[in-house]
């Protein structure tokens, strides 16, 4: 996975995306004027042996394109990582920088488009040109991957062909996207449960189309399908204790390997 990430961050396949990500990195937002922007493709984040994959859309111009990590430094990430923390799958509820100490437990986060697009809207051509990166990532995850949550209709449309190219059988006709949609893909290294969820965009979260409870419910159901052990929302103290224990277990596993 590290080799894939190293190759990915050098990609310059899409001229419009390259120009935009680098322009944003040069001009910056006033609030981040003193920071050095990443300004390159953003690789997936999380363990290479994850059982659950979360597929978004693309990095935010002043989020992942600034920090160099998926859903880090923007409000969409605040919502996502808070939900993962609430059910015991993240070590902390916030994601502000690559060195902030955040660790995911059995979960990896990625996107079908790895560069920040203008107006958060990649073109179909850019989606297709970026697909080989997602296909390679899926193939590397295949031995352990048992469930995936796709955020939004764009991600759903992009993910299904990628899963097919990576060795899973996508039903015909292709399943339609919807919040709470669920289908099983056969093949690969085993069956995979695929879940649809509204995207954690500000448009959805600010209007209440997607609430924290709705997001937690989908993530908890997917985590259970993946063989993980999500927990019910707890008090802040209980959640912190659980996250610390999971972090300790992850560190011990890393030392043994």
Image (cartoon, helix red, strand yellow):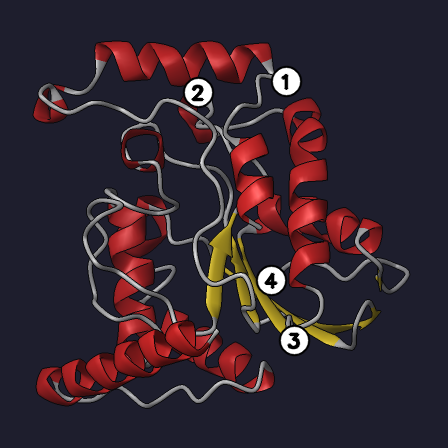
N-terminal-most mark, 1 or 4: 1
* Camera-nearest label, 3 or 4: 3
Residue at mark 2? 118
**Up-down: is 125 above or below 204?**
above
Q: Nearer the viewer, mark 1 or mark 2?
A: 1
- Whether residues under marks 2 and 4 lie with C-beta atoms below 8 angstroms apart, the answer is no
Q: CA distance from mark 2 to mark 4?
A: 25 Å
- Along the polypeptide, which appears first: circle 3 or circle 4? 3
Q: CA distance from mark 3 to mark 4?
A: 20 Å
The residue sitting at the front extreme is: 256
Earlier-in-chain disc, 3 versus 1: 1
Q: Nearer the viewer, mark 3 or mark 2?
A: 3
Q: Return the residue at label 4.
A: 178
Q: Earlier in the sequence, mark 1 or mark 2?
A: 1
Q: Residues within 10 Å of mark 3 (few under 14, many from 20)?
A: many
Q: Is residue 75 left or right of residue 89?
A: left
Query: Earlier along the polypeptide chain: callout 3 or callout 2?
Result: 2
> Is residue 117 shown left or right of residue 238?
right
Numbered tag placed on residue 146 in the rendering: 3
Quarter of the image for residue 192 reads: bottom right
Rendered view: 121 above or below 101: above
| Mark 2 or mark 4, whichever is nearer to me | 2
Asked if the residue at tag 2 contacts the one at tag 3, i.e. Cβ–Cβ closer than 8 Å, the answer is no
34 left or right of 243? Answer: left
Q: How many angstroms separate mark 3 from mark 2 (CA)?
A: 33 Å
In the rendering, at what x and y percent does residue 256 appear?
44, 78
Packing grade of label 1 (10 A; few <14, some 14-19, many >=20) is: few
**Compared to 64, does 143 lie above or below?**
below
Q: Which mark is residue 223?
A: none
Q: Residue at x 59, y 84 (%)?
A: 225
Residue tagged 1: 13
Secondary structure beneath label 3: loop
């Amino acid at each position: 996975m590290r080799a894939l990430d190293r190759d990915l961050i050098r990609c310059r396949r899409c001229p419009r995306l390259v120009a935009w990500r680098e322009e944003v990195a040069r001009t910056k937002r006033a609030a981040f004027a003193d920071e050095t922007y990443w300004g390159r493709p953003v690789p997936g984040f999380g363990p290479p042996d994850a059982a659950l994959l979360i597929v978004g859309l693309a990095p935010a111009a002043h989020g992942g394109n600034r920090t160099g990590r998926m859903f880090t430094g923007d409000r969409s990430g605040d919502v996502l990582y808070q939900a993962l923390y609430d059910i015991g799958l993240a070590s902390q509820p916030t994601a502000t920088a690559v060195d902030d100490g955040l660790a995911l437990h059995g979960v990896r986060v990625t996107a079908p488009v790895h560069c920040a697009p203008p107006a958060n809207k990649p073109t179909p051509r850019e989606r297709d040109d970026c697909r080989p990166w997602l296909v390679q990532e899926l193939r590397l995850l295949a031995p352990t991957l048992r469930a995936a949550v796709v955020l939004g209709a764009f991600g759903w449309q992009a993910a299904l062909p990628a899963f097919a190219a990576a060795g899973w059988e996508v039903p015909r006709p292709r399943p339609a996207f919807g919040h709470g949609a669920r289908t099983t893909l056969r093949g690969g290294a085993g069956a995979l449960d695929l879940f649809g969820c509204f995207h954690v965009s500000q448009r959805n979260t600010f209007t209440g189309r997607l609430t924290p409870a709705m997001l937690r419910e989908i993530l908890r159901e997917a985590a259970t399908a993946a063989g993980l052990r999500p927990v019910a929302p707890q008090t802040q103290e209980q959640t912190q204790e659980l996250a610390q224990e999971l972090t300790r277990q992850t560190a011990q596993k890393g030392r043994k390997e």
